Image (cartoon, grey):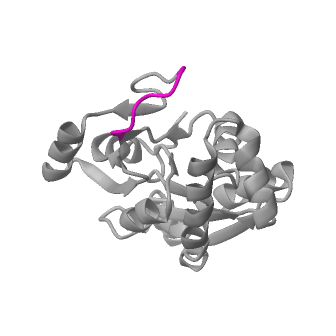
Amino acid sequence: MPDSTRRGLLIILSSPSGAGKSTLARRLMDWDPTLRFSVSATTRAPRPGETDGVEYFFKSRAEFQDMVMAGEMLEHAEVFGNLYGTPKGPVEAAMAQGRDTLFDVDWQGGQQIRNSALGKDVISIFILPPSITELESRLRGRAQDSDEVIRGRMEKSLSEISHWSEYDYVLVNDDLDRAEEKLRTILSAERQRRDRQVWLNDFVRGLNREFERR
């Protein structure tokens, strides 16, 4: 169940393509089913097996741009010729219910979310690969993309990795189980921060009243 005693968190996971953020996001949600995964909107075509509203909200370029102009996007960016963005309404509704939202976004999306009006409730985590050789091996192991697309992703990785120091936490994904355990620890600790416990002021005032009655 969502925790109505605190504000919901916005948990940003970023990494170069192939470093494992999507796998770690799925594992984190299996560990805590109350987590809400932020479904992005995109102008790219659906891949085989993808369903509108599940993996992405698939939009035309005109529809996407209308949402941006109406202020309905928390963040948006163009990546490899396609537009990607996060619809704002569902995120705000989840926060009001004390429900945490998990974002699988690149550094541009993460930066926009951190700089938004909701930035004070953001936890940002960057995932690094153990090596560039391993990163390329993982991309090729997917068997989803052409050599040209893989080259483009590898070139973009240099830019992605250069933004690691902008994040609150940085993990090296050299072992999936160990990286997942560290993610759980981060989330558990962040949920207990004093400024996230909106009930504490009333609780401490109650303790003080007990002292006054003694």
Residue 141 location (% of width, % of height): 77, 41
Q: Who's the residue at 35% across and 61% down the image? A: 118
Q: Is residue 150 above or below residue 132?
A: above
Res 67 quadrant in image: top left
> Is residue 75 among the parts visible in the rendering?
yes
Q: Is residue 44 magenta?
A: yes
Furthest residue in direction front, as rendered? 148
Q: Is residue 40 above or below residue 104?
A: above
Q: Who's the residue at 69% across and 46% down the image? A: 24
**Looking at this view, is 5 or 201 the one in front?**
5
Q: Is residue 125 above or below residue 4?
A: below
Q: Which residues are magenta?
A: 42-49
Res 191 quadrant in image: bottom right
Q: Who's the residue at 36% across and 32% down the image? A: 57
* Numbered-mark total: 0
Prevalent SS, magenta region: loop
**Looking at this view, is 178 or 159 the one in front?**
159
**Looking at this view, is 194 or 63 the one in front?**
63
Residue 123 location (% of width, % of height): 54, 63
Q: Is residue 134 above or below residue 214?
A: above
> Is residue 206 among the parts visible in the rendering?
no
